[in-house]
Amino acid sequence: MDVHSKIVKTKLNVKSIYQFSVTNIEGELVSLKQFSGKVLLIVNTASECGFTPQYKDLEELYRQYKSRGFEVLAFPSNDFGKQEPLNGKAIQDYCSLHFRTTFPVFEKSSVIGYKALPLFQFLSNNTENGKVNISPKWNFQKYLINKKGEVVDYFFPFTKPTSPTIKKSIERLL
């Protein structure tokens, strides 16, 4: 097999996030295929973190780009500093009450290590996703997904969702 064939084969083997189903905050299984054709920002979140005010910025970003085919998907996690003590609907209520969030929030899950949600195992492994090889380092790490469901970039927790870097990246994909 020549080098060109290897490159083509590798690109064909890259999977998308659409192969996964996740549980929403109401306990219902949701196929990520329903987000096909949209640009996504997938974020692991927590309600008692120094970065928790980013919920407000995530909502601002969501409202700014939603009509153009953009979604924020929040995945609460207690992996870092045990900063997500809430469970189930209490998480959604907290987000809605304190930050007026309207984007989807999913079931509290692990996002690192062998117990990580399969979606986050995929997001964190370039052998699987073809691009990014970094697991969340803290709450509010962000993964940018293109309209084909492919991982295209990530942003560390300290990068505000409304930063010019993230906005420009989203705009390029829309």
Image (spheres, rainbow, N blue to C red):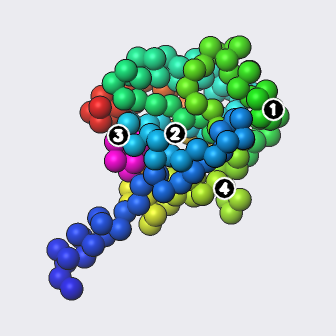
Residue 116's tag is 4
Q: Which residue is mark 2?
A: 42
Segment colored magenta:
144-150
Structural crowding at the residue carrying mark 3, measured as other residues with C-alpha within 10 Å and reported as few (<14), some (14–19) or many (≥20):
some
Q: Could one spot residue 119 in this view of the protein?
A: yes
Q: Classify 1 as above or below 55.
A: below
Seen at 77% across and 34% down, the residue is: 88
**Label at residue 168:** none
The image quadrant where one finds the N terminus is bottom left
Mark 2: secondary structure = strand
Q: Nearer the viewer, residue 86 or 79?
A: 86
Residue neighbourhood size for the residue with mark 2, other residues' Cα within 10 Å, grouped as few (<14), some (14–19), many (≥20): many
Name the residue beneath numbered marker 1: 86
Query: What residue do we see at 20% from left, 76% from top?
Result: 5
| Few, some or many residues within 10 Å of mark 1 (<14, 14–19, 20+) | some
- Please tell me which of labels 4 and 3 falls first in the chain: 3
* Marks 2, 3: nearer the viewer: 3
Judging from the image, what secondary structure is the residue with disc 3 in?
loop
Q: Residue at x 50, y 46 (%)?
A: 32
Q: Are marks 4 and 3 in contact (CB under 8 Å)?
A: no
Give residue 37's mark.
3
